[in-house]
Amino acid sequence: MPPSLTSFTDDARITLDNITDRASGLMHPAIRLGVTGLSRAGKTVFISSLVHNLLNGGRLPLFEAVRSGRVSDVRLEPQPDDAIPRFQYEDHIQALVRDRIWPDSTRAISELRITLDYQSASSWSRMFSRGRLSIDIVDYPGEWLLDLPLLTQDFRAFSENTVTLAETGIRKELSREWLALASSIDMDAPADEMTARRLSEAFAAYLRACKADERSLSTLPPGRFLMPGDLEGSPALTFAPLPNVSETKASKGSLRAMMERRYDAYKNVVVKPFFREHFARLDRQIVLIDALQAINRGPEAVQDLERALTDVLACFRPGSNSFFSSLIGRRIDKVLVAATKADHLHHESHDRLERLTGRLVDRAIQRIGMAGAGIEVMAIASVRATREATVKEDNHILPVIVGTPMAGETINGERFDGNKKTAIFPGDLPDNPEALFQNLDTPTAELPEINVVRFRPPALEESNGGLKLSVPHIRLDRAMQFLFGDRLA
Ligand SMILES: Nc1nc2c(ncn2[C@@H]2O[C@H](COP(=O)(O)OP(=O)(O)OP(=O)(O)O)[C@@H](O)[C@H]2O)c(=O)[nH]1
Ligand SMILES: [Mg+2]
């Protein structure tokens, strides 16, 4: 491992950014809240519902400042960063609330500022000023965090890790074409653009196949291959790992030398700038995970989620990587790992989902030898798309959830049109999460059956005066209290 991955200029730039942030923070207190998670984990829905609930006086009994009536005004304001796309709150909330469809997938970083005026809880502080706090919410793909380990890997190590992983379990089948092509190529032959492109396209196709819905695998670096944005087709994305790279130096002008150089470019133009310009400035972080989806997909998806979570949490461990240690320790002091979409379960299982997530996090932080301080775990639903009921069957009372399946969903052979409601038995999580992890490593491991139906977002209730109420949720207020409640004291 190289002793230091950062140069003096990186450090200096980060320090300067942080000082600038702080100086402006003195006049106008602000915190930067990072919202991340692997794709489809629920980032966009989380931010939209959080903001909607704050703007519309949502039911937030566990968010102390709101419960005690100390928040006097909430509004959206222009964000401080001119170069980051704005999180298009209005579009997303319109889809959710008016059209009752889920917002579109988003593929890059975005930001939104929400400002709260509040009365301080202590009469001493109240005497001096009214409190004001801006929360800059930054939405970014969790996949980008999975690139951190690349900073400590040279091309050979990266190739070896990627190829080894590609030969395990279900990935073996999905990587066949790419690996066959890669093995047929002479990496010491003169570099050739078309070969580089073919290899890189085959590699990206393998990554996409792993990610496809029915597989739901999570650990797929380099993250930008799946969401290239404006780098699509650039040399920094036109490379691929190679099997059996030897220890000797690549010969000049060879395909291998070209791949090595481009891999390094990827780290320099993609990975480092993200950590330096965005990640390093966060104060608080929520990591959303879709644990239910992984359980539904089987043991390999759960193990894979665990691996991804380990790599994500490693980003929050100061000292694990020297590029980092100089900055992370100072800033992010609270991380919330939240299992989303808890509305797919009956409330009896919410605590179980939370315990299971806690176990997942424990295993991850044990693996990287990290202390759990500052890390909290919750099971939440940003938007509650279901309500609960019971049905009687053969003298048993069964807990069920009721919702409107999305148009096209099929349950027990019945195809839904997006208007009809139905009740389903969601399935149970084990009381003791250990039961799930104990047999994860056996190939025939059986996981609990969770019935994951895609429900439409709920129709909002109206108040007596005909006013639409805010988006219903599960434990979103608890998440708010943890993430920024202390800054409104
Ligand atoms: N029932 C329910 N479904 C949810 C909830 N949050 C997210 N979903 C579902 O998960 C899907 C993905 O949510 P998004 O918020 O778009 O996820 P994302 O992390 O922003 O996804 P990308 O932008 O693609 O990375 C949604 O389309 C919904 O179907 C929730 O609280 N309850
Ligand atoms: Mg999104």
Image (tube, grey):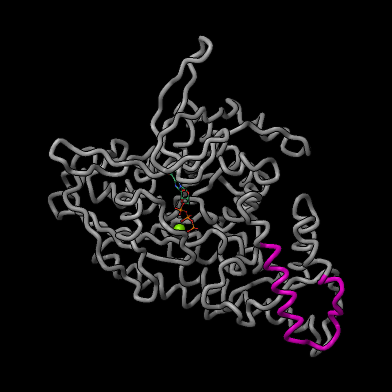
**Foreground pick, 394 / 194:** 394
Q: Is residue 11 above or below residue 389?
A: below
**Residue 468, percent from left and from top:** 22, 44
Q: Nearer the viewer, residue 19 or 446?
A: 446
**Residue 205 belongs to the span the image colors magenta:** yes
Position of residue 382 in the picture relative to residue 147 (left or right): left
Main secondary structure along the magenta-highlighted residues? helix
Classify residue 171 as left or right of residue 346.
Answer: right
Q: Residue drawn at (23%, 48%), measured in percent from left and top?
A: 56
Magenta region, residue range? 181-207
Outermost top residue: 395
Picture quarter containing residue 465?
A: top left
Residue depicted at 45% across the width and 40% down the height: 405
Q: Quadrant of residue 83?
A: bottom left
- Relative to residue 449, is residue 417 depicted above or below? below
**Total number of numbered discs in the rendering:** 0
In the figure, residue 233 lies in which quadrant? bottom right
Residue 144: percent from left, percent from top? 56, 64
Return the x and y of residue 77 as percentages of the image width and height: 25, 64
In the image, residue 459 sits, relative to residue 249, either above or below, namely above
Q: Is residue 123 in view from this perspective?
A: yes
In which quadrant of the rendered image does the N terminus lie?
A: bottom right
Name the spot of residue 120 as percent of width and height, x first.
20, 47
- Residue 369 showing in the rendered view: no
Residue at x 33% of width, y 51% of height: 99
Q: Is residue 66 magenta?
A: no
